[in-house]
Every structure is written in C-alpha cells, then in structure tokens.
Image (tube, grey):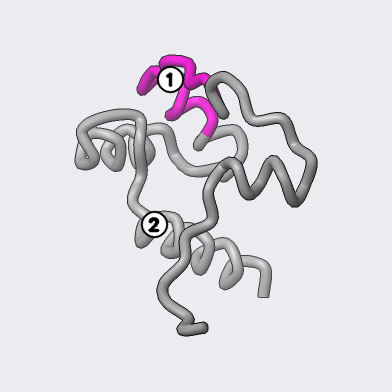
Amino acid sequence: MPIEEVTITLDDVTSLLHLLIVGAFHSFEQFYVDDAINMLVELLEVNATEARAETIQCHDSYVRLSWLRDVYQMKIEVCH
C-alpha cells in the first residue's frame, strides 16, 4: 500500500479526539490602536510615544516582531 501525502481534516479531529467541531473557532473583536498603545505601555512598560510610533509604522493596532525583540533585549540589558 503506497503512502502519499495526507491531510488531517476536522472529521479526523472529531473522530480521534472526540471534540465537537461546530461554529466559529474564535470570534475576533475590534481592537483599537489606543487600546493597543495602552496595553504596550502598561504591560511592556514602553514609552507611549514609542508605542504610538510603532503602531503608526504598522498602520494599525499591530507591532513588528523585531520591535518586540528589541524591547525585550533592552529590558534584559537593564536588568543585568
């Protein structure tokens, strides 16, 4: 019996894991830029101006992974 490419389907998930698959997996709520900035300031302790500049560069309530890495590296250096 030759083995070819296979794909796991939602029916497979239901059969194997006994999980009921119905409806939307996740419903997304609108996330506003100001909320994102407030979250960045509160949780990452970054400057609001810096957070706003990053969201402007990303054209919405997003940030770049490279920016997050830079913030993380900066926090590590401050701690040591």
Looking at the rendered structure, the kind of residue marked 1 is Phe
Question: How many dots with numbers?
Answer: 2
Q: Residue furthest right?
A: 18
Question: In the drawing, what numbered circle is on residue 65?
Answer: 2
Residue drawn at the location 44% of the way across and 39% of the way down:
47
Looking at the rendered structure, the kind of residue marked 2 is Leu
- Residue 67 at what x, y percent from top left? 37, 56
Q: Residue furthest bottom?
A: 2
Foreground of the two, 46 or 72: 72
Residue drawn at the location 49% of the way across and 43% of the way down:
46
Residue drawn at the location 54% of the way across and 56% of the way down:
8
Q: Is residue 65 above or below residue 22?
A: below
Q: Is residue 34 magenta?
A: yes
What whole-number distance in Å separates the C-alpha atoms at marks 2 and 1? 18 Å
Residue identifier under label 1: 31
Foreground of the two, 44 or 26: 26
Left or right: 56 with respect to 70? left
- Local packing at callout 1 (Cα closer than 10 Å; few below 14, some 14-19, many 20+) is few
- Residue 39 at what x, y percent from top left? 54, 30
Foreground of the two, 54 or 79: 54
Q: Which residues are magenta?
A: 26-39
Q: Is residue 44 above or below residue 61?
A: below
- Local packing at callout 2 (Cα closer than 10 Å; few below 14, some 14-19, many 20+) is few
- Residue 72 at what x, y percent from top left? 53, 62
Between discs 2 and 1, the one toward the N terminus? 1
Q: Quarter of the image containing the C terminus?
A: bottom right
Residue 31, by quadrant, is top left
